[in-house]
Amino acid sequence: MNLIYFTKDAYKLLKKDLNANKDNYYSDDPWLAQYFADQGLEEYCKTSSIVVPNFQLLNVEDGDNDAKNRADLANIKTLYTEYKDKITPLQASDPMLWSALCHITFRSYVLQRWKKDDGTVRLGKRFFATEGRASLCYYNAISRLWWSGYLTYDDSGESANPWHLTETLFSAQQIQKDLFDQPFSMNKNIVKGLLKALKRIQEENGNNCTTIFRECCDGYINHYGVVTILDILEPDEIEKIAYNYMKSLIKTTSID
């Protein structure tokens, strides 16, 4: 199939009328074509020249956080493998692409994966995307899969498993949130260096070390970036800095 994307006019209309349309999102009936026809918009979606396989994403029925993490990891591997040689980071920053995929191609997945206890979904967060870091990496239901793969996939040959850092990222939901909350979280070198350090710490201590990682990201690395240009450092340099700091914390902090 060819990747699709919304026109800007369609995207703006959908966002403007989100509250009026909210019941439509939970309906089994197709509604987008009629909605745009009623708005007088003949062309609401365009087809790109980018050809990708047609595949489904894995979902879990009422799973706990660990089950959802495992499903997320499997979906990152599937989606990024199929898309990584097809789209560039610039194309992957386009809200029109991810919003269209959420509304059309992967609509059922989004509704199931992000259903809350009351059966609703945060429609504005999960179905729409912006150019912001938080939206692309964390909130939009489909772009988060691509960006998680892009930022962590390691084909350097250092490990026989190119997903080893992706698996570290999803070893706990808190790790993903703490990392993608940071202003540096779209820098591949910094992300890889931090996750390499965390992986070592986890292997040494036998748990996820979420508290230590959060303190490293929130405090030390951000402060370090004030006095050092983090963007010019290689992953191994970031790893050394982060590992030494987290190691020092273990002596004075309970690990969890």
Image (tube, helix red, strand yellow):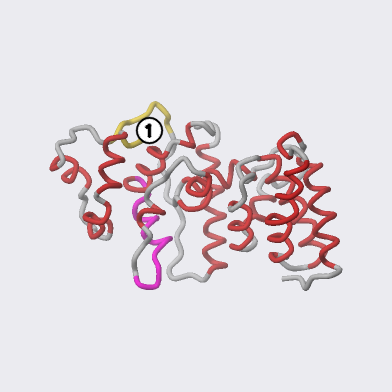
Q: Is residue 90 visible?
A: yes
Whether the magenta-drawn stretch holds residue 220 is answered as no
Measured along the vertical axis of the image, is residue 70 above or below residue 133? below
Task: Locate residue 104 relative to residue 251 in the image: left or right.
Answer: left
The answer to whether residue 112 is magenta is yes
Type of amino acid under label 1: Asn
Left or right of 170 on screen, residue 131: left
**Residue 94 point in image, percent of width and height:** 44, 36
Foreground: 115 or 20?
20
Q: Is residue 36 left or right of residue 117?
A: left
Q: Which range is magenta?
A: 105-118
174 up-or-down from 12: above or below: below
Residue at point 75%, 56% (across, down): 199
Residue to which mark 1 is pinned? 2
Q: Is residue 239 left or right of residue 189?
A: right
Q: Residue at x 42, y 50 (%)?
A: 56
Identified at 84% across, 70% down, the residue is 252
Q: Is residue 84 above or below residue 174?
A: above
> Splitting the image into 4 quarters, where does residue 110 fall?
bottom left
